[in-house]
Image (cartoon, rainbow, N blue to C red):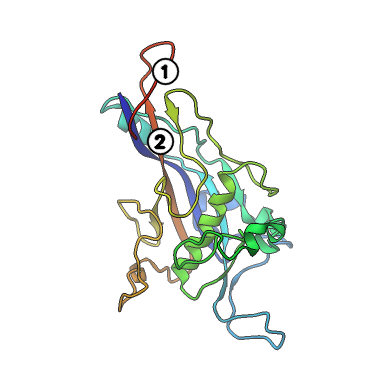
Amino acid sequence: MKVKHRLPDFVVMSYPETGEAPWQDTAWMSPDNAYSENGGHSARRSVQGLDNTSMRFYNSDVIGHPGGQTIFSLLASFGYSLSSQATPFMPHYLSSLDPLGWRYNLPDILSTQTWNPLTDALGNFGDVYPRGGFVLQRHSFKAAALTAFRALHVVTRMGEGRVYQPFVPTPHPGFWPPGPVKPNNEETAWQMLSPIAQTDASVWPQFDDSLTPYDPYAPHIASDDQYVWAAWRLYKGCQRRGSTLIAHFGE
């Protein structure tokens, strides 16, 4: 029997003030430091033209979800289910500890993906590369979501030249974990935990608001610019019945 379902691998946060992560239980992991000053957004344009009123900055942290085992136990009570290899409370990425990568876009600034106009974008949220905290986006939710996506994009890959703990589960016969996070892919869905607590998860972008007369993301905007999501990832597998998996079919 082949099964597939989502598991909450990570809690991902986006917030402007360094040292003030919205998840208090893990805020001590990202203390304020001299190399990672506070963020926010530009209010005016400088004479040099380096500032932009649409430019925003967010710190982003990726932490192992504390409830993964609980979810697995719940699913297991209904029959065969898959478990995540994520470790609860494991700090996979703390942007304040990676100032060169998050604030100066190193080494991404040297990557062809940063300069390629055809590089993947997360809908109208913005470009995935360079994977740093600065976003040219007026919309608070979209800017915060994009930085969260960028941080998880780094975590789910090996050898990124960043200060991080990668999470790349190893597939084996009968177990197919999700691949690296990327746009236009349904393997990763996002459940907002703050400023509002959602009961479901959605693939980003959740809405196509390019032609809508209203802002469908308005209820999701945080007045204090602090956002928290759970990242649910799609796992596939089948129960072992013999010594060798000869073939498998379907999704």
For the residue pair 171 and 23, the one nearer the viewer reads as: 171
Circle 2 crowding by C-alpha within 10 Å: few under 14, some 14–19, many from 20: many
Going from N to C along the chain, the mark reached first, 2 or 1, is: 2
Q: Residue shown at 42%/18% (left/top)?
A: 245
Q: Residue shown at 60%/63% (left/top)?
A: 133
The residue at which mark 2 appears reads as 235
Point out the residue furthest to the bottom here: 47
Q: Quadrant of residue 244?
A: top left
Q: How many marks?
A: 2
The residue at which mark 1 appears reads as 245
The amino acid at mark 1 is Leu
Q: Position of residue 50 (x, y in %)?
A: 68, 80
Quarter of the image with the C terminus in it: top left
Quick one: SS at disc 1?
loop
Point out the residue furthest to the left here: 78
The amino acid at mark 2 is Tyr
Q: Position of residue 18 (x, y in %)?
A: 61, 62
Q: Residue shown at 43%/71% (left/top)?
A: 223
For the residue pair 62 and 172, the one nearer the viewer reads as: 172
Q: Is residue 135 left or right of residue 222?
A: right
